[in-house]
Amino acid sequence: MTTPRLWLIIPAAGAGKRMNSARPKQYLSLRGSLILDLAIESMSDCFASDNTALAGCIVAISVDDPWWCDTRASQNDRVTSVTGGQERADSVLAALDALDGQAGPDDWVLVHDAARPCLHPDDLNRLLTELKDHQVGGLLAAPVTDTLKKTAAGGQDVLETVDRSQLWRALTPQMFRFGILRCALKSALAAGLPVTDEASAVEQAGYFPCIVEGRPDNIKITVPADLALADFVLSRF
């Protein structure tokens, strides 16, 4: 039986408007490196390990991206770029389509956020280990610890306190079989269904992704204050 290979996809075509910066957040500097480079290099265990070596990495960038050529990743011969789409799902699907003919249906695809540089090696290893024999795949997630309040849409008055005991914050990487993920994304986009992450598309296709508990400090940089927090987290690794 052929051992499934491992592929990495980084959707990096987003504009990151909430950062209020002159360039997308994945191209901002953090600890002397571009955030996108840090996000890709956080997967270095996959680049280095003989047991889980990446077959390849594809970064989906915007059609008019002038910053990609400044990254370390663009100089890595194991990393290639494709033109992404308007939404995250479009970018991930474009990368999956680029793998058509190279990746087998049972190969693994890791999808990791371009602005999530604080992935700890232990979390990555746990994800790879716990999902290696899973038929579908799953994702890193952190249990919700804050008390949750529900309001009416657009309102401020609390309607109820939500039970958090079964709630998780979805993180990345998310890891799915190539064939399942590609079909799920195609079907969801064709049907006009909302796709907030890869797991949501897989769920809508009738599968049950597995949650692997990850560290809550695997943060995604979204607003300016996140830069200082990410700097602190990385200083503790």
Image (cartoon, rainbow, N blue to C red):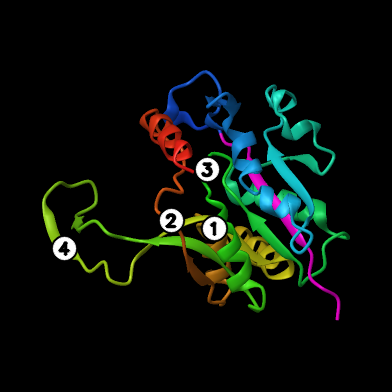
Q: Real-space Cα distance between discs 2 and 4?
A: 25 Å
4 or 3: tag closer to the N-terminus: 3
User: How many numbered marks does the figure carry?
Assistant: 4
The image shows residue 232 at horizontal and vertical percentages of 41, 35
Q: Real-space Cα distance between discs 1 and 4?
A: 34 Å
- Residue hosting label 1: 122
- Residue hosting label 3: 116
Q: For the residues carrying marks 2 and 4, which lies nearer the camera in this image?
A: 2
Q: Residues within 10 Å of mark 2 (few under 14, many from 20)?
A: some
Q: Can you see residue 173? A: no
Name the kind of residue labelled 4 in the image. Thr
The residue sitting at 70% across, 60% down in the picture is: 109
The residue sitting at 48% across, 21% down in the picture is: 21
Q: Is residue 227 magenta?
A: no
Q: Real-space Cα distance between discs 3 and 2?
A: 13 Å
Q: Real-space Cα distance between discs 4 and 3?
A: 30 Å
The one of 220 and 187 positioned closer to us in this rendering: 220
The image shows residue 230 at horizontal and vertical percentages of 44, 36
- Residue hosting label 2: 215
Is label 1 in contact with label 2 (beta carbons under 8 Å)?
Answer: yes
Position of the N terminus by quadrant? bottom right
The residue sitting at 49% across, 69% down in the picture is: 211
3 or 1: tag closer to the N-terminus: 3
The residue sitting at 70% across, 22% down in the picture is: 66
Q: Which residues are magenta?
A: 1-14
Q: Can you see residue 179? A: yes
Secondary structure of the residue carrying tag 3 is: loop
Name the kind of residue labelled 1 in the image. Asp
- Residue hosting label 4: 161
Q: Real-space Cα distance between discs 3 and 1?
A: 15 Å
